[in-house]
Image (cartoon, rainbow, N blue to C red):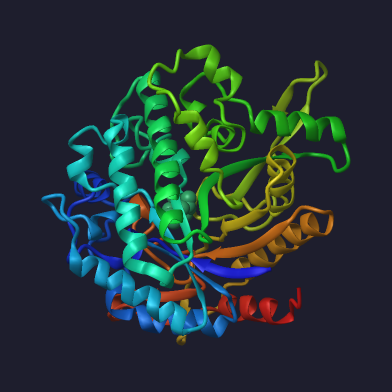
Amino acid sequence: MRYGVGSSGFQIEGKEGRSLSVWDLYLEKEGTLDGSDPSYGTDFLKCYKEDIALAKDLGISDFRFGVSYSRVISEDGSFNKRGIRFYKDLAQAIKEAGLRPVCTLYHWDLPQIYENEGGWTKRDMAYRFASYARFLSESFGDLVSSYVTFNEPQCFLGLGYQKGLGHAPDTEHDYEAMLRSVHHVLLGHALASEAIRKRNPKAEILFVNTADIPLPIRKGDLSLERALSKMLFSIPKDARSFYTESLFLDPLYFGSYPAEIRERSSLSFVEEGDMELIHKGKPDALALNIYTGHYYDLDKEGKVVEVREEEGPKSPLSWLNFHPLALYYGPKYFYLRYGAPILITENGGCYDDRLEEGKIHDPDRINYLSSYLDALKKAKKEGVPVLGYYYWSLTDNLEWKEGVSKRFGLVYVDYKKGCLRIPKDSYFAYRDIIAKDKD
Ligand code: BG6
């Protein structure tokens, strides 16, 4: 198994030296929920070598980092040489530590100059994104051979392009404009993959989806499992249409939009050759961010109904229930539909950490980590090709609109002391799990 940790540029780097992104403007307007200042991140620009050393000592193989798009694109639209220098140094340091740099090109923070021109609703955006990917992959050369084009379109489009859902840019678009934006993201992925492969034919290219996994209330009830898998890949008619899976993955894996979408739209924005190109951009593995799920049963008429099932310790984040079986059923459902190997690019627990005499005892996170990993290994044992698992995140970070008080890290960041790092008990537990796993 490839073990790793994940991070994203916007959440750790701070604002210094880059142009404005949609998230800067959104947080300026709305503020963070805990009132913390989003300008500094975890001071990663200065501390990245220390963080890489901590990652190396975990015994992981993969270090997933995110490029902040607005650090590479200046306010006038030109490439920012200082920005790219930083990412080259970072990739170099990751490689020197003996780790595989896995580079996410887009983790939500679209440069505001592009949003001002219509962002993903405009076809031009796909071509801009491809030229950014080309520029980065040429600059990295052989330093980076694993790329994630997009992280969670369910969030940056599904939540960000509908008003009031807590994500930047918090704009409102009608159904057709939303579909058009999805198409431009997929096209951007395909064009970027082509550009990266031109420079580096053996590169691993991924597209990260996130999902809330429907879990069966009973084990071994195959008709319930089938109904839940069908539900996971179906597309509701309302705003949730865009927080779904098949909308993004069917075009990549099967070369066409799901039937529900074709019935609802003429897809007039699809140009000749687009679907073939998107299908050619099929990722090298199915990259999934899975944190949680919900339990379901069938009622007397055979309809799927949600049932409450409380498990384990409560997280301070209301959406994040402790349901480890999400990492068993999730990979299983996705593998059955798309037949591709699975890489878990994010999974992690958020708990109220307290610094006590210089230490963080976080048994809930240890329980989260080991229970989810056990579930994933069970899926693997039963034949699902699982390539690896990345814990989110190495350090605490700026959790978007939540601010810095919601902590996912294996390493505590003491923001009052110039972003001092303190490995939590879970850091050592993850290290032990990795050391014991001979697979
Ligand atoms: C994932 C994102 O969806 O969830 C991360 O890729 C994020 O960027 C993580 O930090 C935790 O979610 P949230 O919404 O609580 O910040």
Instruction: Please give the name of the residue rendered at 46% of the width and 58% of the height, measured from the top-left corner.
Output: 147
The answer to whether residue 155 is left or right of residue 260 is left
Residue 118 in the image, given as x and y percentages of width and height: 23, 32
Instruction: Please give the name of the residue rendered at 67% of the width and 61% of the height, measured from the top-left corner.
Output: 387
In the image, residue 312 sits, relative to residue 47, either above or below, namely above
In the image, residue 74 sits, relative to residue 84, either above or below, namely above
In the image, residue 218 sits, relative to residue 145, either above or below, namely above
The answer to whether residue 16 is left or right of residue 302 is left
Residue 271 in the image, given as x and y percentages of width and height: 40, 23
Residue 151 in the image, given as x and y percentages of width and height: 45, 49
| Quadrant in which residue 266 is drawn | top left
Residue 240 in the image, given as x and y percentages of width and height: 50, 28
The answer to whether residue 438 is left or right of residue 238 is right
Of residue 72 and residue 226, the one placed in the foreground of this image is: 72
Instruction: Please give the name of the residue rendered at 31% of the width and 30% of the height, measured from the top-left corner.
Output: 121
Instruction: Please give the name of the residue rendered at 40% of the width and 20% of the height, measured from the top-left corner.
Output: 175
Q: Quadrant of the N terminus?
A: bottom right
The answer to whether residue 34 is seen in the rendering is no
The answer to whether residue 255 is seen in the rendering is yes
- Number of on-image labels: 0
Q: Quadrant of the C terminus?
A: bottom right
